[in-house]
């Protein structure tokens, strides 16, 4: 696949001749990789990086955080504008054979209702049906990438990851472990039966590599690829193929960090009560700070704690040969161990 360019790749793990393009390359360094700092909002930065690397394969993993930022619409719009800039620059360089876009499993979901065993057959969900602007931009960027398939010798595919966790994870694992540390691991919102699909980061990286290799094979093919096995121009949902009840997952992470909670000690809070408590706290924090601070938990996040959202990965199994590399329990152990090593073992009790 060499050379490879990973966009937004600080924290991702790929084994190859890799150059990472990211706005900040100061964290999660991998010794064997090269690094270029630049912004997705800068056409010149993108063009310069592509000219320097002349990559054969690009993994576009970049995305701003989903929660906790001001000017969210402007930040999330980078998903669209940065993707468009990259596609335009790729046409100029004409060295790239395969582009794999890291999308989101939520692009087919309105992020409000339950979703059970969803597949890639569902249409992309855009505003106004789409209630999260972040997800709207991920869907729009995915659409740009897939419609560019076959242009200027470029083949494309999208990998739709679901609820990532693992080593170097900067969101799921830290939030859950910190909650357990503060004694919040005993709280549960709702009846706890909502199933969620999670994905270990190593399995997601593996799916990206499988997709890239498939695109390179198809690029070199002399015969048309049958539609039922084709990878180029397609999207693939990736999960650990092992749905877990959401609150069992959080308690398993807490236990791995040294803060186990017995089922009989769980405090169940109704969804409606928790929602109105969150609304109250939002207003209190906003008022006391004169609008300068935001609450750590927002009403829009409540539904994610109580929603069922699972997916089928049959298409990835058939066309990519994908299988999860690490099971859920082992993935949880690795994720928590990595986080505690990074933050200091003083947080873990034996």
Image (cartoon, grey):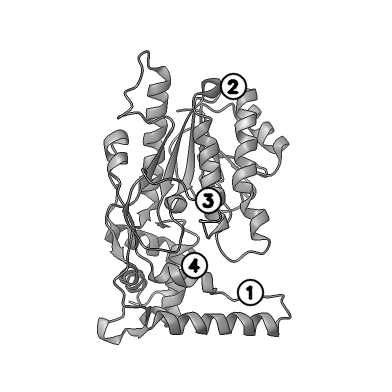
List x then y, in percent, for residue 338. 41, 60
Horizontal side of 334 relative to 6 (left or right) equals left
Q: Quadrant of the C terminus?
A: bottom left
Label 1 neighbour load within 10 Å: few <14, some 14-19, many 20+: some
Distance Cα–Cα, label 4 vs label 3:
38 Å
Q: Nearer the viewer, residue 296 or 326?
A: 296
Q: Nearer the viewer, residue 107 or 169?
A: 107
List x then y, in percent, for residue 257. 37, 71
Of the image marks 1 and 4, the number of the one nearer the N terminus: 1
Distance Cα–Cα, label 4 vs label 2:
43 Å
Q: Identify the disc placed on residue 94.
A: 2
Please say if 194 is above or below 44. below
Of the image marks 4 and 3, the number of the one nearer the N terminus: 3
Quadrant in which residue 226 is drawn: top left
Q: Determine whether label 2 and label 1 are within 8 Å by CB.
A: no
Residue at mark 3: 126
Distance Cα–Cα, label 1 vs label 4:
25 Å
Q: Determine whether label 3 and label 1 are within 8 Å by CB.
A: no
């Amino acid at each position: 696949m060499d050379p490879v360019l990973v966009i937004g790749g600080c924290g991702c793990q790929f084994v190859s001749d890799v150059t990472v393009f990211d706005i900040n390359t100061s964290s999660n360094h991998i010794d064997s990789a090269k690094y270029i700092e630049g912004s997705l909002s800068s056409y010149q930065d993108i063009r310069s990086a592509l000219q320097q690397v002349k990559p054969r394969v690009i993994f576009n993993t970049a995305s701003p955080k989903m929660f906790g930022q001001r000017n969210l619409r402007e930040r999330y719009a980078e998903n669209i504008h940065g993707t468009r800039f990259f596609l335009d620059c790729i046409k100029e360089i004409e060295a790239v054979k395969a582009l794999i876009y890291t999308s989101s499993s939520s692009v087919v979901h309105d992020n409000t209702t339950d979703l059970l065993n969803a597949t890639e057959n569902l249409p992309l969900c855009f505003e106004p049906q789409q209630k999260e602007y972040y997800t709207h931009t991920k869907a729009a960027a995915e659409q740009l990438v897939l419609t560019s398939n076959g242009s200027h010798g470029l083949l494309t595919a999208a990998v739709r990851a679901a609820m990532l966790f693992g080593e170097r994870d900067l969101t799921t694992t830290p939030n859950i472990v910190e909650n357990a540390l503060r004694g919040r691991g005993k709280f549960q919102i709702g009846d706890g039966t909502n199933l969620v699909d999670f994905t270990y980061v190593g399995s997601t990286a593996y799916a990206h590599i499988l997709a890239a290799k498939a695109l390179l094979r198809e690029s070199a093919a002399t015969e048309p690829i049958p539609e039922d096995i084709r990878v180029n121009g397609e999207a693939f949902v990736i999960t650990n193929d092992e749905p877990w009840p959401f609150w069992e997952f959080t308690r398993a992470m807490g236990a791995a960090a040294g803060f186990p909670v017995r089922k009989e000690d769980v405090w169940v809070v109704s969804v409606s009560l928790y929602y109105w408590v969150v609304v109250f706290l939002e207003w209190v924090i906003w008022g006391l700070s004169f609008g300068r601070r935001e609450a750590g938990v927002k009403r829009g996040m409540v539904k994610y704690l109580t929603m069922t959202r699972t997916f089928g990965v049959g298409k990835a199994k058939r066309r990519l040969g994908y299988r999860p590399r690490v099971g859920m329990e082992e993935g949880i152990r690795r994720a928590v161990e990595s986080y505690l090593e990074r933050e200091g073992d003083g947080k873990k009790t034996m």
